[in-house]
Amino acid sequence: MDSKSEELLRLRNDAQSIFLAGIHAVKSGEAIKRYCWRDGNDLIIGKNRYDLSEFENVYVIGAGKATAAMAHAIEELVGDFISDGVIVVKYLHTVPLTHIRTIEAAHPVPDNNGLFGAKIILEIASAATIKDLVICLISGGGSALIPLPFGGISLEDKQTTIKTLLSCGAAIDEVNAIRKHISMIKGGNLARVIFPATLVTLMVSDVIGDHMDVIASGPTVPDSSTFQYCREIIKKYNLASQLPESVLEHIEKGVSGKISDTPKYGDRVFKNSVNLIIAGNMDALSAAKDRASELGYTPLVLSSVIEGDTTQAALFHTAIAKEVLKTGHPVSAPACILSGGETTVVIKGNGLGGRNQEFSLVSAIEISGSENILILSGGTDGTDGPTDAAGAIADSGTLTRAEKQHLNARDFLENNDSYRFFELLGDLVKTGPTDTNVMDIRIILVTTA
């Protein structure tokens, strides 16, 4: 192995170490333990103390990719008090539980298992009284995992709606706004059912800005979006001819006031509820930054709220990498530039991939020929789009290796086929389920060696 290859291998190993450090810092089970503990019969959650002996029942409900590990940690704390519980997780994102039932369902497009799980959650919520405590565990993915559309809207209609929204380039808050307004359980509607029981919601954030009403479409928090906003989203992306008639009619009824909007701030249904975010993207970036420093890099965190078009985001990040090489700005090499958030891809082809793999593919094209740059973009949940990869790694030699296999990177990009491109090169990042979900981590390493 020549010195150039050795350097790229070192960069690759460093990038993966930095990525895993970020993930480890936001493991949802460990996050529960940082915010929750027992003192005899008292359960302390953040700044709040709950005497478990004063409640007739303790119920645990929840949904999301990282919820199983959260539920396991809660069982370790209060398992002896749990009367009933159910969580809905993505297929294969499970851990053994004793007191809480687990239902596996589909993500990102909902299925009948998710519908069944949502109905069970609603049953438990409806049974709660003023004498009970409900602990709700929420993480990213919860929107798709607990579909419960209003009457007149079928599961198939909701599936079509979500597929359309995900493929048009809509931001996650826009997708979730429509999800909330066609759901009986999202947008604060679950809290409406649980009231007047005591409600504590613990959340792992996978959304820009950590807005609670966007995480899993905010089933237990006040909703800031409206039916009118949903109408504007449909107009913005020209979706009127693509969405099911039942969905369009429901939203128009809401706009005209024939259907009550989701509960807002100040609504009495939130009187007995507490909401707490226990892990987010900046937590992961901070840990990644620390690991980069340990490895000898000068780290720079750009932002935890990068969103918008994936291609444009990749062009921005690679431009910074080139500037580091050229002028030593905004940080001198050896540098580790970090960012988080979640970008979107407008699907034009019929290939396989996700936003992180597409980010890496665009980056590979842009840094081709530039020495000593390596880029890793990965989802902290271990799943990038509808694939089994968290993301992919690109470096200045990616295109050269691809050309030796007669692979045209631009053709793969045009077909949104980043997964197969990086699979053929052996450059996919695969972690399996990570027990967390705080959006993405992008790592740019630049050296002068």
Image (cartoon, grey):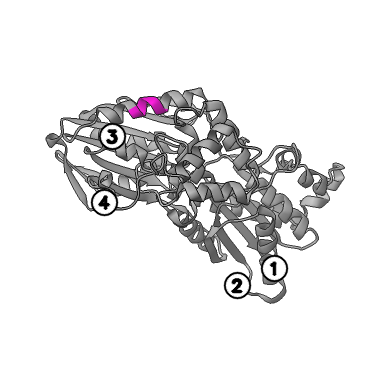
Dot 4 lies on which element? loop
Specify the segment rendered in magenta. 118-122
Marks 2, 4: nearer the viewer? 4
Disc with the residue nearer the chain's start (1 vs 3): 3
Residue 331, label in figure: 2
Along the line of sight, the residue nearer the viewer: 118 or 244: 244
Marks 1, 4: nearer the viewer? 4
In the rendered image, which quarter contains the C terminus?
A: bottom right
Check disc 4 and give the amino acid type.
Answer: Gly
Dot 2 lies on which element? loop
How many neighbours does mark 4 have within 10 angstroms: few (below 14), some (14-19), or many (20 or more)?
A: some
Q: CA distance from mark 1 to mark 3?
A: 49 Å
Question: In the rendered image, which residue does mark 1 sit on?
Answer: 448
Q: Is residue 111 above or below residue 234?
A: above
Q: Position of residue 373 (x, y in %)?
A: 70, 60
Is there a contact, CB below 8 Å, between mark 1 and mark 4?
no
Disc with the residue nearer the chain's start (2 vs 3): 3
Q: Position of residue 184 (x, y in %)?
A: 40, 34
Q: Is residue 368 left or right of residue 121?
A: right
Question: Residue at image x 56%, y 30%?
Answer: 157
Q: Answer yes or no: is residue 432 visible.
A: no
Q: CA distance from mark 1 to mark 4?
A: 46 Å
Question: In the rendered image, which residue does mark 3 sit on?
Answer: 76
Is there a contact, CB below 8 Å, between mark 2 and mark 4?
no
Disc with the residue nearer the chain's start (1 vs 4): 4
